[in-house]
Every structure is written in structure tokens, then in C-alpha cells.
Amino acid sequence: MNTRIRQSAAIIALSSAALMAATLPAHAQIAAANAPAAQQATTQAQGDWLNLRQIYDKLEAAGYTDIREIDRERGGYEAKARDGEGRKVKLYIDPRSGEVLNRKTRDDD
């Protein structure tokens, strides 16, 4: 009798898991459809962005070294690195072109 209960419980658990897995794509579509327009626009705009590897490669090609902490921030990328003279800098990077838009010399670390 105990074995039947375990088998039934296992069948119910597996059936529930299969049902949940089958409905996940529908839930994702509903969530995307209900997302605010601004959030959808941001996601679409970020689709044109260079990825982190591409940003790293562009910074390296521009002569920056010790490149770290590349983050998506304020509508673009920010990174910490060292410039050609070895100074610590914080870089503000265009997400589509990889161009350094602004840089600040850092005194910390």
C-alpha cells in the first residue's frame, strides 16, 4: 500500500512538472505583452548594443589596459581601466559604437 502511495505521488509530481514546463512559454509571451512600452523600447534599443566582449576589444584597441568592471549604466556602458599613461580612468562608452564619450581620471584604489 505504501508503494502505491509513493508511485501515485511521483506520477502527480511528474505530471505537474510537465504541465508547468508546457505553460512557461505562454506565460513569457503574456508577460512580454503586458510589459510597459518604455521597458519594451529599452529592451529593443539594447538589442543594437555591442556586447561586453566587443566593448572590451574596442577599449583594448584604443590603448586602454587593465580593463575591468564593464557595466551597463545610464543608457550606455561604463568601465574602469588604465589609459596609455597608466592612469586609472572611468570611461563612459557609447553602447552602439564602442566610442569613449567621456573619461574621468580616478584617484581611488
Image (spheres, rainbow, N blue to C red):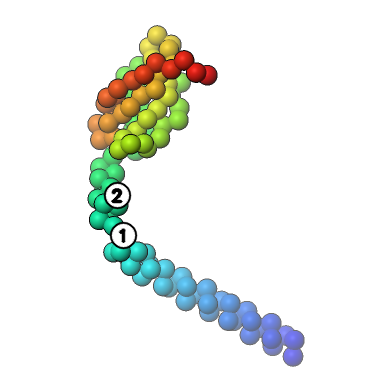
The residue mark sitting in front, 2 or 1, is 1
Q: Amino acid at mark 2?
A: Thr
Residue 86 locus on image (x, y percent) = 43, 11
Instruction: Give the residue drawn at x 46%, y 21%.
Output: 66
Circle count: 2
The single residue placed furthest to the top in the displayed view is: 85
Q: Are marks 2 and 1 in contact (CB under 8 Å)?
A: yes
Q: Amino acid at mark 1?
A: Ala
Instruction: Give the residue drawn at x 34%, y 33%.
Output: 77
- Count neighbours of disc 2 (C-alpha within 10 A) and say few if under 14, some if 14 to 19, many if 20 or more: few
Image vertical order of residue 47 relative to residue 104, above or below = below
Q: Judge by depth and name the residue closer to the eye, 64 or 103.
A: 103
Dot 2 or dot 1, earlier in sequence: 1
Pick the quarter of the image with the N terminus.
bottom right
Image vertical order of residue 95 relative to residue 63, above or below = below
Task: Calculate the distance from the C-alpha at mark 2 to the C-alpha at mark 1.
Answer: 11 Å
Q: Judge by depth and name the residue closer to the eye, 12 or 39.
A: 39
Which residue lies under the disc numbered 2? 43
Residue 83 locus on image (x, y percent) = 38, 15
Quadrant in which residue 8 is drawn: bottom right
Q: Which structural element holds mark 1?
A: loop
Is any atom of residue 108 visible in this view? yes
Q: Judge by depth and name the residue closer to the eye, 87 or 54.
A: 87
Quadrant in which residue 98 is drawn: top left
Residue 25 locus on image (x, y percent) = 38, 67
Q: Which mark is residue 35?
A: 1
Is any atom of residue 64 visible in this view? no
Instruction: Give the residue drawn at x 30%, y 38%.
Output: 75
Residue 84 locus on image (x, y percent) = 38, 12
